[in-house]
Amino acid sequence: MQYRDRLLVRVFLLVPAQAHLAVFPGTGKELPLWQKAASFHLDQPWGLVIRSDRIAKQTGARPGSRLFISERRTGASKIRRSGTVSTRKQIRVIGVLLFGICSHLVQADELAKTSQNPIGNVISLPAEAWHYRGMPGGTEASLFFLKPVYPLTMGNLNIINRLIVPYINLDGPDKGVDMGGIEIQPNKGSRNGLGNLQYQAFFTPAKPGKVIMGLGPVLEFPTHSNGLGSDKWSAGLGAVALTMPGNWVVGALLQNVWSYAGPSSASGVNKMTFQYFINYNFDKGWYLTSTPIITANWEAGSDNRWTVPFGGGFGRLVTFGKQPVDFKVQAFRNVENTKFGPDWSAMFAVKFLFPK
């Protein structure tokens, strides 16, 4: 039988074949996937877009979302649901975020230690508020300090420049007041005003070792008003030594100034200031601190010379946006006191840091 004859004899089969083939296009509605071109990137497995409601129900995905074939087990493809980013990319992003958070915490802890270093190489603007009670005659006193710090680098040396600007407020009659080495002229009653400015400059190594040391001049100027300080011009020398092992910042500052000019009627100045500082740092910028200021007036008698406070407090360095700020609170009891000194004092400090 010729091929043409065979075709004619079996032409009747076209009718049932049409009915059978008509079913096939309908299966296009259930064909589950439109597949993208194959990718050979490890972090971009085969991406498949869901086009079938039935497949969406089976896989738990929603129509139009993307599935990725992640691995094959026992010859069958295991399909997992994903967003527009693969698991490896997600892990990568999470890792970067965790690294950034950890780095930020480490930097905050290191910056807190730098803030506790009085000769740290960082620009800062500290402000302190002190309150004194227990002075003769019921006088109370408050001191406000601005202590801007601006370091400079010259070769192998850092020069830490600090200006101390005091503002003093006295409440009540006084027979004389001595607040941490700041002597107030007596018999003036309640008053307030500027105290004597003091300038400090410490020369420190640009690359210090385990023990950080600084040495430099101290100048004091009679800028006071309303008798809130000495009328003498004074100068002297200051020294700092500290170490920062582990979580600790431990050291001391010592300075002494002598008067060299001013009215002959004014009392001479020869006073020492000694401040030890002990800080222990915890996580997230928290720390314990003790920074009492011990003073000795060498012009006074031996029974009216020393002010020795004892106490401490706590603090924390936090960041507002990109601005680090150090907060600190302390309280002290004078275990040794001058005739006009307070029994106790409390302070609150805030320091704005501007790291380079």
Image (tube, helix red, strand yellow):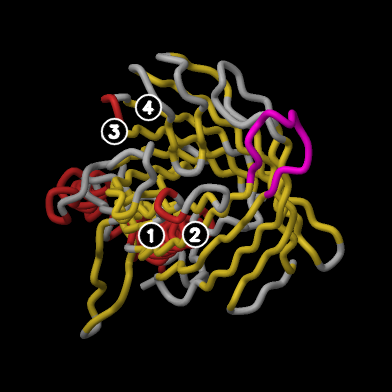
Instruction: Say above or below: 299 vs 117.
Output: above
Cα distance between the residues tagged 1 and 3 = 54 Å
Numbered badge on residue 247: none
Neighbours of disc 3 within 10 Å: few (<14), some (14-19), many (20+): some
User: x, y (%) of residue 299?
Assistant: 57, 48
Cα distance between the residues tagged 4 and 1 = 54 Å
- Residue situated furthest right in the rendering: 155
> Mark 1 or mark 3: which comes first in sequence?
1
Taking depth in this image into account, of 68 and 278 the one nearest to the observer is: 278
Mark 3 vs mark 2, foreground winner is 3
Mark 4 vs mark 2, foreground winner is 4
Q: Which residue is mark 3?
A: 133
Determine if the magenta segment contains residue 264.
yes
- Secondary structure of the residue carrying numbered label 2: helix
Tell me, yes or no, whether the two marked residues, 3 and 4, touch with CB atoms within 8 Å. no
Could you tell me the amino acid type at mark 4? Ala
Numbered badge on residue 107: 2
> Mark 3 or mark 4: which comes first in sequence?
3
Could you tell me the amino acid type at mark 1? Ile
Q: Which residue is mark 1?
A: 94
Is 132 on the left or on the right of 150, as rendered? Answer: left
